[in-house]
Amino acid sequence: MNKTNFKVILAILMSSTFLGFIYNFFSSDGIDFIRKPILVKSVSISEENGDSNQLRGIDLSQAVEIFNDNSATFIDARDQWEYSDNHIIGAINIPEFSFDPSNKYLVKLNKEELLIVYCDGDDCDLSKRLAQKLISLGFKNTYVFLDGFNSWLTAELPIEKGKLNE
């Protein structure tokens, strides 16, 4: 390869990179260059938690208690393939990445009912982002299961496999 071809390739790569950054900056779906942490306040569901717009989280023991009481709807924020591999028994799948406010499962939910949103665990922000979207739609009784599905599996709690939303 001669120097001219190398310079042309380099110029094309630099131009493409620059145009990509410009497009991302002005796009409504742009990706943040610096990841913004999503803050979640750990709470106990049994106590009054103040601002219902504040993102609130629960741990494994609270999630198990709520699951055993059958007092909440569990929402799996992972994609449909992970959900169909395995999920908490009775959980519905509303993937965060393809969130649609008119989702057929979402429109059936009562805005006053207790919702527990989860994904894989602490390093997974899908549940936090989905919970924010649900809260903005008026689902004020929404909590994030902070320990996530991985801790549920580790604790050998009940799961379903290979079943998509009905």
Image: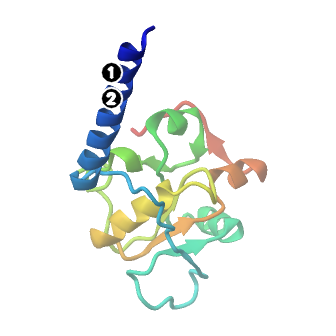
Residue 24 as seen in the image, left or right of residue 51: left
Viewer-closest of 5 and 165:
5
81 up-or-down from 63: above or below = above
32 up-or-down from 163: above or below = below
Q: Which residue type does callout 1 highlight?
A: Val
Q: Does residue 149 show up? A: yes
Q: Does residue 73 show up? A: no
Viewer-closest of 49 and 97:
97
What sort of colour scheme is used for the picture? rainbow
The percent position of residue 44, horizontal first and vertical second, equals: 61, 82
Label 1: few (<14), some or many (≥20) within 10 Å? few
Q: What quarter of the picture does the C terminus occupy? A: top left
Q: Which residue is mark 1?
A: 8
CB within 8 Å, label 2 to label 1: yes
How far apart marks 2 and 1 lie (CA) works out to: 5 Å
Check the image and name the residue furthest to the front. Answer: 3
Q: Which residue type does callout 2 highlight?
A: Ala
| Disc 1, SS | helix
49 up-or-down from 117: above or below = below
The percent position of residue 65, horizontal first and vertical second, equals: 66, 69
Look at 37% across and 23% down and name the residue there.
Answer: 7
Look at 66% across and 61% down and name the residue there.
Answer: 147
Find residue 118 and report its image quarter. Answer: bottom right
The percent position of residue 151, horizontal first and vertical second, equals: 71, 54
The percent position of residue 48, horizontal first and vertical second, equals: 51, 91
Q: Which residue is mark 2?
A: 11
Check the image and name the residue furthest to the top. Answer: 1
Viewer-closest of 43 and 15:
15
Residue 145 as seen in the image, left or right of residue 29: right
Residue 61 as seen in the image, left or right of residue 51: right
- Residue 55 bears which disc, if any? none
